[in-house]
Each structure stands twice: as structure tokens, then as C-alpha cells.
Amino acid sequence: MKSLNRYFSKIAILLIAIGSMAFLYWFGYHKNFNQGCIPKNADGIAMIDIKNIRNFFIFSCIKNPSDCQWNSTDTEFRKRFELSNYGIKTPDYLAFFHIENQPIFQWFVSAEIENETAFEKVMVKSHFRKIALQNGMTSYYSNSFNLLFIKYSNQILVSNISEKQKNIAVKVADDLFLKKLFLDAKKIEKTISTQNAVTFWIKKNSFLENDGILNLKLEDQEITIDGQLQFRSKYKKETQFLQNPNALLSLGFDFEMIRNQSITKLNSDKINKIIGFNLDSIFANNPTKTELLLNEIVEKKDSAISYDYDDDFNPIKKVVVHTTREPSFYFSILTKNSKKAYNYLKTQNAIDNRDVFVNFPLATTKTSIRNNALTLEANSLKNSDFQPSIPKIGYLKVRFNKLQPKDWPYIIAKNKNFEFLKSFESFEVELSQENKFDLFRASLKTRDGKSLIMVINKYPFFKTF
């Protein structure tokens, strides 16, 4: 009898173990993807693996429990990421997508409503303006959040599109919810069931000969993105850029990459107004290698002397010290005939008789021609540490740890979410060639060895409603 009991006990333990493993697999790793969440005319997708990200934070807390001291504030922070609090079903994947011929920063995402009462309550509480549309659709728009919701039955489309362009979002919702014009799932099958927190799919375009895939991974102290791309031949040129390893910001690329892009065409008037001359005058001279080194922010002090008098009419000297902060930078753009471009800027009074570029008010900026490159330079470093880089297609490097505490208030004033970057040391992007492949690498590293989970907990930076 005892042996029989032991036999059944072993079976029970085995079944519990199998059941637990099945539950853990279903809870943490089993994922379904709704193929009807992306329209046919999407040319870019950011596939966010919700369970992958959740598992990362769970295991991070297990490894570093001291970084996960949840309090009431943290609990509120976590609630912001639980879509069910807004009446929205939390899927295994969230597919943010970009539509062809739309601004690069304009994105969409679709989802399902599981609690319409909760959803409507959030819309009212957050002051979204509700308008009934045709074909059974309803729009909700908020000026403060700059968000548009298009609702049809239990489906919603969300976008950061402006209200004036609402018809574009309505057309996307019509294609998804009514016409069922979905993107071929085979095109994005590489973005599903990967080990990545986010996988980006980029449709072949004027840059790429074939569709591109980029992978975003979460690590203990870093967020990385990497992937192999196949650029068209005219964008493969590698260049030795001039680098300052201690610069606050470094940027280098071939101007050919942005010459005919919509971002410059659609915003040409704004760009011309900002720089004070017609950008086509530079385009006409076939610009190529372009680089910018923002070395640091220089603090300058000027003294103003004035005199006052005491009761006996004796002069009293007063010294008032004015402190200003100016950028130290070097900008260079190589063209076919930079002297011609320089002379054009002279005729437009953008350069004065002292060779000062007058359209940049933040610092006295000297203009010159060096090795057939048009250069602009302000507050040049006396002991510069400029070094030629290993040849690459392009790069960007920002060192947040070079910013002083007094710099951040000006940055955060533009967008409070930028405060999140204070916990990071650097951001780097590099395009290069290796074994005939075009490699894209990007990384965002935390500061002072802080764990990524600690940074996320510290700054609930998302503006939620």
C-alpha cells in the first residue's frame, strides 16, 4: 500500500512539474501575433515583444533585487504600462508602423478594446474630444497629448498625427478595419519569435536595395540595436571623419544621403529661414563629406565697470560680472566648389567682412575654406585632440556625461521627457562596412554602472493620461 502511495505521489509531483512548466511557458514565452494589425502600405515596423520586455525586467529584479524596491510611486509607474487600465487588451506584440510618404516621426499602432467603459472613462478624464465619423468610426483627439484615436467596434488606431491630418489616420483605419488590406505576413516573419525586445523591419526604399531588419536588445546596463543592411551603391561610400574623442557631440555623414530625401524637400522653407540662405545654393555644388564636432559649452565672463559716489562725492568703483555660455564647435562640408558657395553666402550677407557667419547668434562663428571644404568654427580649442577616424559610412556620438548640471534645465525646458537621458552616459550610432555588408550599430549606455532596471524605475518619464 505504501509503495502504491509513493507511486501516486511521484505521478502527482510529475504532473505538477509538467503543469508548472506549461504555465510558465504560456505565461512567459508562448506568443500569438495578430496579422491584421498592419496595413498593406506600411514601409516601416517596430515590432515590440511585450513578453520579452516583461521577462527582462522580471529576471533583472531577481538578479538585482535592490534595484527593484517597489513603493507606491513605482506601483503607479507600473500601472501606466498595463493597458488594461485604459480598457485596452494587452497583446503579446505591439506593432508600431509607419505609412509610405508620411513624415518620418509620424507612427501608428492598432489595438483592441476589452473594456469599453474603462476606455471611455479614460478618454473623458484626459479631455479627449470625441467626434462621430462615417462608416461607424469615432475619433478622439487631445491637443495636450497630441494623440488621435480612431475607434471602430472594439478596434482602435492610435497615432501622433495632428488633428488637421486626421483624414490620413481615418484612411489607415478604413484600410485596416473595413477593407482588411493587411501587409503580407511573409515580409515580416523575421520580426516574430526572436530573442529581441524590439525588431525593426524597413521596406526597401531609395536607401536600401532590400528590406532591412534591425534588432533591439535590452542588457543590464545598455540598450543596443544592430543589424545588416544593404545600401544602394551611391550610399556605400566610407569616409575618414575628423573626430574629437572628448566631444560633447560628434556627427559625420555623406550629404548625398539626405540630398533628395523628403525630410529636406518638405521642410526646405523652414530650413532656409533658420540658416538664413537658400540651401539649394549648397546642393548646386554637390556637397559630400559633412561633419560636426560640438566640443563643449564654454563659459565666458565679462566685467562691466561703473562708478557711484558716496556722501562725500568720493567715486566708488563697481564691477558687474556677466557670465555667458557659448558652444565650441567645428562644422565642415566638402563640396565640388566650396569657394563658389562661400562667395554666394557673401552676396547674401550671411558672411560679413570679418569672415563671420552672422546667422548664428549664439557665438562668433568664423568662416573659411580648408581643403575645398566650407568650414564654420566658434571658440576653437587651443589644445584640440582631433583624430581621423576609421573609415565609415556615417556616425553619431553624444556624450551626455559631458553636460553640466546647469545645461540640463535648458534641455528639459524643451521636453520634460529628456530628463530621462540624465541617467545615461552616451549614445552612439555607426554605419560601416564589413565583409561587403553594411552594418548598423547603436547603443545607449547607462551612467556610473547603473542597471537599466534602476534607470527605468527612477524616471517614470512617459507622459500618460
Image (tube, rainbow, N blue to C red):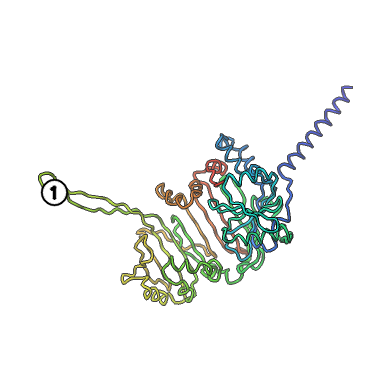
Q: In x, y percent, where is residue 292?
A: 45, 63
Secondary structure found at label 1: strand
Q: In x, y percent, where is residue 103?
A: 57, 63
- Residue displayed at 49% across by 75% down: 286
Q: Quadrant of residue 246?
A: bottom left
- Residue displayed at 75% across by 39% down: 23
Residue that sits furthest to the top in the current view: 1
Q: Badge 1: how crowded within 10 Å, few (<14), some, or many (20+)?
A: few
Amino acid carrying mark 1 in the image: Pro
Of 89 and 356, nearer the camera is 89
Q: In x, y percent, where is residue 459?
A: 52, 43
Quadrant in which the N terminus is drawn: top right
Give the residue number, with chain letter if any, for mark 1: 315
Of 229 and 192, nearer the camera is 192
* Residue 129 in view here: yes
Of 245 and 128, nearer the camera is 128
Q: Is residue 361 left or right of residue 183?
A: left
